[in-house]
Image: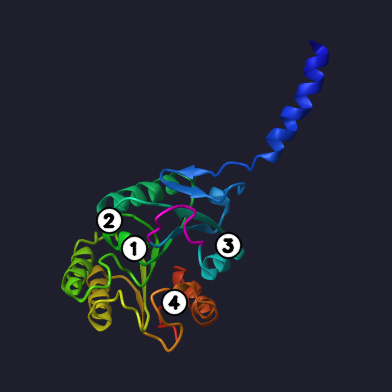
Amino acid sequence: MRTILRRTLPLLLLAALARPAEAAEAGALHSAAGVVPRDSAATGAVVWVHPFARELPAPDAPAFAERLVAAGWDLWRFDRAGGPDPLAEGAARLAAGTAALRARGYRRVVLLGESRGAFIMLVALRYPNLADALVLAAPAAHGRRPERRPQALADFAAALEAADRLAPARLALFLFDDDPWDPDPSARAALFRAAAIRLGRPALVVDRPPAPTGHGGLQEPDFDRLFGTCLAAFLDPAGPTAACR
């Protein structure tokens, strides 16, 4: 028996070491496998809320998230795949996840979302104390058909109208030129600014800059190069509120 144990224990230990460490969980949110969250010791938690994905793994967080990680933030993800990816249910799960991050001891929570992920974040604004800041890039949830544009704009406005008075302290919106999913960028920029004024929140609105362009502008290398520094400064509670140029 002792001989068997001497032979099997090293093999079990090697097998355990060969397996990647599991991701940490905070409700529906998770960290990268093998990354130990620092909780209250971190600058904060940045949550990547990705576009619609038919299957996992979903798109990686953009370079801007890595900028925050380098500044001491922990990166978390809100992954969804397949099915209808419902907005209301996703918003409730996201809000529960950010509450779980607070319970872990994070002093600051920032949500970074793109396309459908960003629209889920908009719907989640109805939950008080959702996060300290939101960065929404090209929110979309209604497809590209022209006949869907009125509903897309109406739902965008309704999500902002339903935002709780304890909405995130800082709100940033990026709209990109040549985005076939955007029903009316000028109207959406105006609605967003009006909602921020109503809520008494600083707003950063970047409306169709020369670059990057397209629905996936957040993922383009130019995004972090052009906007990374000023956006990181905007997310700082003591940072400037002037527009990125």
Residue furthest out toward the bottom: 210
Horizontal side of 19 relative to 46 (left or right) equals right
Query: Magenta region's main secondary structure?
Result: loop
Q: CA distance from mark 2 to mark 3?
A: 28 Å
Residue type at mark 2: give it. Answer: Leu
Q: Are marks 2 and 3 in contact (CB under 8 Å)?
A: no
Q: CA distance from mark 2 to mark 1?
A: 8 Å
Residue type at mark 4: give it. Answer: Gly
Q: Earlier in the sequence, mark 3 or mark 1?
A: 3
Q: Are marks 3 and 1 in contact (CB under 8 Å)?
A: no
Q: Earlier in the sequence, mark 1 or mark 4?
A: 1
Q: CA distance from mark 2 to mark 4?
A: 22 Å
Residue wearing tag 1? 116
Mark 4 element type: helix
Residue wearing tag 3? 69
Residue wearing tag 4? 217
Find the magenta span and give its range. 52-60
Q: CA distance from mark 3 to mark 4?
A: 20 Å
Residue type at mark 1: give it. Answer: Arg
